[in-house]
Every structure is written in C-alpha cells, then in structure tokens.
Image (cartoon, rainbow, N blue to C red):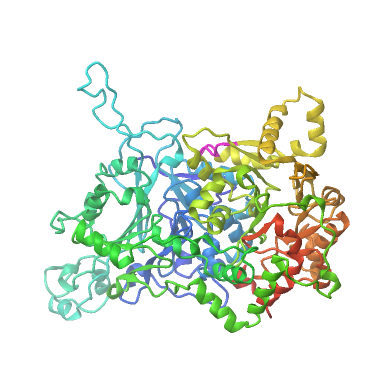
Amino acid sequence: MNGGSEKGGILATEEGKRSEGFNRKRAQGRDESYRPKKQPLNPGNWGNTCNSNTIAYVQILGTGMDTQDTSPAVLLFLQQQRFIFNAGEGLQRFCTEHKITLSKIDHIFLSRVCSETAGGLPGLLLTRAGMGDKVMPVKMWGPSDFEYLLDAMKSFIPNAAMVNSHSFGPSLGSPSMVLQSFDNPFVLIDEKVIRISVVLLRPNYEEVSHGENSDKPTSPEPIKHVTKPGDLSVIYICELPEIKGKFDPKRAAALGLRPGPKYGALQGGNPVMSDSQDIMVHPSDVMGPSVPGPIVLLVDCPTLSHFRDLLTVQCLAPYYVDIAHEVIEGSKIVNCVIHLTPLSVTRTDDYRTWMSKFGAAEHIMAGHEMKNIQVPILKASARLAARLNYLSPQFFPSLGCWTLPNMDLPSETEASHEVRMTIFSNLAIILAENLLKFHLRPYANMGLGRSSIPKLTSHSEIIQELLSEIPEARDASENVTRLLSGCASVTEEPWLLEDAVPSCLEDITREDMEIVLLGTGSSQPSKYRNVSSIFINLFSRGSILLDCGEGSLGHLKRRFGVQGADEAIKGLKCIWISHIHADHHTGLASILARRRDLLKGSPHEPTLVVGPYQLNWFLSAYQKLEDLDLRFLDCSHTTEDALEAFDSNEGNPSKGVDSSLCKILGELGLEALVSFSVIHCPGAYGVVLQAASRINSSGKTIPGWKVVYSGDTRPCPKLIWAARRATVLIHEATFEDGMMDEAVSKKHSTTMEAVEMGNSAGAYRIILTHFSQRYPKIPVFDEAHMHKTCVAFDMMNVNLADVHALPRVLPYLKVLFRGEITIADDSEDV
C-alpha cells in the first residue's frame, strides 16, 4: 500500500511525521496556547498510568438515523482525545442539542469520501474557524483521493478554516484503475494512548470474460475495479493499550531488588539485573497478569461487491476466532464491531457468517436500521414541530416519522432474539440508538451503556405537556381552525383587516402551489432552526428548491417521510442558489446524489442548478469525486437583461442552456424564473418565480401568482422592483430592529426593513425568514407592523390557498412562545 499523502494549501497548514498524530504537549496539558482558560488540565501520561479509573468509550451520534440521509457518526472518547468517524449533514446540529463539544475534536476520519459521510464537514470547519483561538487544530483522514473533496470546499471555505488533512491508499488517477491487494493494515496513528489502522475495501465485481473456451475464464483472479474515488471504503481498527498488571514489591525484594529506579524500569517493561543475586529480573517475574486492551472495529461495507472483497482480506485474520469461538494463538480479541454497512448487505447470511468470526464481540448495527425511522433524532426541533402542528395542522403538518403506517418492526429484544435463535447461537446483535455507548474503560464497566439514550416522547405526550404548561393553547388552536375554515368573524384590530385579495388567488386549489420552509435560520444550524432552504412544491408538475443549506435532504424526509421525500426529489426540476455562503448551498451534493440514485436506469433529465458562477467551481471539483447528474446555469444568465438578450440573439452560446430552462419552466407551469442582483456579497442574487396564467372553469383568464425570494441582502431598489405586486415575498430578516449596526456591517436586513421592503413593493403577503440563531425559537418583532406578515418556522407549509390567512395566524403563534421572545445564550444554541 502506498503511504499516506498530506494535502497542502488552504485546508492544510501543518507538516509533520505520521507518528505525530497527536499534539502530545496538548494531550498532557503542557501547551499553554491551547489550554482553556480557568480550566487547568492534569491528565498525566495515560500510556504509563492507564488504570481502572481511565474513561474511554465509543458512542453513536445518530446524525441521519431517522431519515437515512447520512451515515451515522461515531465518537471515540478518550481521556484527553476525541475522534469522530464520519461527518454527515446534521452532525453539528445534533451535537449542539446534546452538548457534545465538537471544538475539542482532534481527528476526523471518513469511511468513504462522499456526501453521505462528509456532507457536514464544510459547516463543521467553518463553525470551528469562527471559534478563533479557543478551538484546537484538527486533522482529517480519508481514503485515496480525499483531496477532491478538499479542493471542492476551497471555493467557499476561507483560510481561517485551515486544517491538516491526510489521505491514504493508492492514487486513483485512472478512472478504471485495477487495484492490487494489500497484505497489511495501514497504520495511521500509533501512540501510547491508541493505535488506529485501516483496511481498504474496493468493489470486487468478479468480472470473468468467456470466450471460445467458455469453461476457462481468461482471468484466474477476480478483478477489482474502482471507477471513482467514492468507491473505496474503509474498515477502521482502533486498539487501546493493555492495562499492565500490578507491580509486586515483595516478589521484587525476594529476587534481590532494592526500591529505586529499577522498579520503574520493570513497570515500563524492561528487564533489570538483580542487586544482590546474579540473575536478570524480567517484568513477568514481578508483575501481575496484564489486561488486554479493548479493540473496536468500524466497518463500512457499502455494497455486496465490497463484501466480496472483504472476504478475501487476509490482514483481518489476527482478529478472528475459530469456529468453536476459541482464541487462536496470536489472535487479538475484538470487543465491539460497529457496522455502518447498509441493511441490503448486513441481512445476508454470508455477512452474518463473517460477523461470527469475531466470536463474542458485540455487534452494533448502525447502517440505516429501519427501527430508527420512527425516532426523531432532533428532539428539540421535533417537540417544537409537534406544538406548532397542534396549533395549525394546515401550516404545520405532522412530521413524517409520526405519520408512518404500522411497519411491524421487531423490538430490539425480539430482533436480537430472532438472530440468535435462527442464525448463530452466539452472535450478539444490537440495533444502534441515539447516543448509545460501548464502554471501553474502566475495564469493569466494559460493554453497552444506555444511560445517555434520550427518553422517547410520543406526539400525544408533547401535546399533553403543552396544554398543561399553556392551557390557552387549546383556544388558540380552535381559533386558527375556525379562521382557516372561513368561519371566523372579522377582528376589531385594524392591523388584522383583510387586504384586497389579488386576482391570481381566484379559484385557487390546494394542488396549485405550496411553499415548504425547510430551513429558516442563518449562519449555522441550531437546536430549533436549520439553515436556509425553501421547497416550492408544484405537485404533479414537479418542484424547485430555493437555496439548499446543510440538512435540506434530512428535513425533506422529516416533512414528507422517507418515501414521500424520495418522490419529491424525483420530481425536482431545478435548484436555485442565491450565493456561495455555506449556509445556502452545502446540502446540494446530497440531494443531487439522492436524485441520481433514485432515477438511475430510467430516462430523465439532469437537474438544472442555477447559481452564481463561484458555485460552479465547487460543483466541477466535486464531480471528480462523484457524478451529481446536473446541468449548471449561471444566475447572471437568468437576469431580465440577460434573458432579453438571449431572445434577441439566437447565436448566443448560452442560448441552448436557456432553452433548457424554458423547457423546465414549461413543465412546471411557470412563465419565468428571473434572478436579480442584491447587496450582500459578490455574486449574490434574489429570484422571481412567475406562474403562467390559467383559464378557470368559466373560461376566465386568471393571472399567475408571483413568489419572490430575497436571498441575503440589505434593502435595495432592485428588490422593490422585483417584488412589485408579488403574491408572496419571502424576505430575510436576520436581525431585530435594534441591531441596525450589525445588519449594515454584515449586509443583512432587520425585521422592520424587510417589512418595509414588502410594503414598498406592494407585496400581498410577506414571510420573514433567515433569522439569526440568537433567537432560538421566535424572533423579536414589532407586532404593530405585521398586518401582512408572518414569521417562518422550519417545515412550515404555506399552501397558496391559505396564504390570505398568514398574518391572522401570527398572534396565535405567539401564544406558544409566551415569555420566549428572547436572545439565546450563544454558548448553548449557537
């Protein structure tokens, strides 16, 4: 196997030997530049003092277990070291909720290089960079051409997010390169506290060419092809040091040794000469029996083709036991195997047979187990969504995980019992759960730990708690129901009086259009709000995404359910991105990859991605890693001036791309998609979606609706022009009115400015979004100016047939947040 390669440039700032996997001075608390203030460290040297009081465990961080959109992350916790294996989308949001401090992570390892395992890396690196000097440096490790991913991220990750990155394994310069087999695991880290090594897996397609002599294959050995970097997968082997036996001073004295340095030498594993006898004293003469160090394997075997290769790997032999589960001489006892392998592989008899080679090891199945779909991973967000759903099911439909049909899933006990009884009598299988631990130290506690697993809360329990806490929520819910059914009387408050209903809403149906606000926060995901993403659902005609922040795929699945989201993604025609900031586009790759997989083998058009030119740098670099099945169109080619130029100049080289957009708009029933520049960062845009006119049952022509999205911006004339007589203006409102200086310096809008923009443009309804994460649940706003406005919440559903009632719902929403219109403690929610 080739040695590891270290990537330089923006994402790499350190050079060093591989043996320097840890900052030893920092691990021992002797590096003042990384010592947290007022928290002196005194960890000692674990390699010499490892004992029953040392703490170590592995833990499941279930970033995508309820939505099956990412590979679960795994935390390896040592006394003064933290390791993360995989960083799918939603990792930092999950860790924020459960108070897992990502700033203390020393190393990040990827089991594969793809959106499923690495989609959360950009946001994580940017968040760490924003912590300044408080954050420790981090090293990233990945198989083979890991640098493709890093090169892609350079387009939007600044120098402040520098890390040290390492790739290992062969270079995949040729698309169809045949890899040779490797005899030994490749050691990444070999320190006193831990040894981490890897075994590479690659697809084994068993390609056999049959010619005239069909009984003799032309290739005696299976050929292992790698078509793209993401084909390589990794098994990580984590080995902790043994706990040495207790030193016996009486035995040492009997062998002629006097107390002194020789005692220390023996405890360090070195023989010494007796002080009064002509003999060598060996450590085994004076030390009790050692306790073997625990061993954990993380296995990512994504396909049956990879599994065929796994069966041929000889370097895992020292970790196997024989058929009778007896330890072969020289074997290493594996205590826990965490399987990131999908169900399609783990459910096969051959895979279970391979699992049994590890004897009495515990097997934690974390590869998209079906049981976890029904358990919300983001509990705080799910709890808020349930309360909002109680208030108004029309605007806040129930989460997909709470609307699943009875899947007759076996309980963990039943599933484990079935496996033990029907397959292998001694195979211990555990279905992974949120925050499930496997304790490695202290030795006496080795095994599963369930104390951190969150208590399950049903939808009904959440509502009972709400009504107990806020009894008036019941009346609020009934009032909203009457309001949306048309039975409510006109309120006496003048700011709630109905505006003139625009003609485009005449004879509107519930199958025309709905706006699903998947993410309504800014900068980075928080406990209650994900980052920007808006799903425009045109039902049977298809859909459009406006921005696509990290976690957009997961929220689609939470909103529509796993199967419903897949149907929505298959109908996704276009993704429009406002600007290159990470909170607006880092969920793009995972959604495109999911659509590619869903439509593989069936006739379809690539997804059209419309965005600023800088976005194409990222997509072009990323597609060296995996094909995203897309066609890119620069936002500058969709401005009103550009579209007029295309119409008048058939020889324009962009004419063909514009024709593609026109085709998609026609399928969606839209007349236009027009981008317009805004005041934020270079290449920042807003967008206008104009629906085509329609003929009602009476033969009357009804003008099409108009939805305008501001992106991130300061108030500007172009936005007022674009939003003229808009049916709905979706406008960012990052800051409250008292934070004008921050809004100006960061080129965002305040709540009042966003409302004034909509009023100046004559917009019928205004939806405020992109709130600073300073406001954890509901932003600060002046109710007196909200007569045509509503604030957005994650997974809020605004059907065009209900848009007239938006402002009237706002006062009832405030009932749910009695006393909670406050600014969050940054250390907890940001």
Indicate yes or no whether the magenta region holds residue 627. yes
Left-right relation of 560 to 475: left
Q: Residue furthest front?
A: 698
**Residue 237 drawn above or below residue 776:** above
In which image quadrant can residue 356 be found? bottom left
Rendering coords of residue 130 (x, y %): 63, 61
The answer to whether residue 735 shows anywhere in this view is no
Q: In the image shown, does 680 or 180 lie closer to the viewer?
A: 680
Rendering coords of residue 685 (x, y %): 75, 47
In which image quadrant can residue 169 be found? top left
Q: In the image shown, does 823 or 156 lie closer to the viewer?
A: 823
Rendering coords of residue 454 (x, y %): 45, 72
- Magenta residues, start to end: 623-630
Indicate yes or no whether the magenta region holds residue 150. no
Residue drawn at point x = 22 percent, y = 76 percent: 247
**Residue 668 drawn above or below residue 717:** above
Left-right relation of 367 to 645: left
Left-right relation of 155 to 399: right
Quadrant of the frame with the N terminus? top left
Q: Residue furthest left?
A: 278
Residue drawn at point x = 76 percent, y = 25 percent: 652
Q: Main secondary structure of the magenta part?
A: loop
Numbered label tally: 0
Rendering coords of residue 296 (x, y %): 32, 60
Quadrant of the frame with the C terminus? bottom right
The answer to whether residue 153 shows anywhere in this view is yes
In which image quadrant can residue 758 be found? bottom right
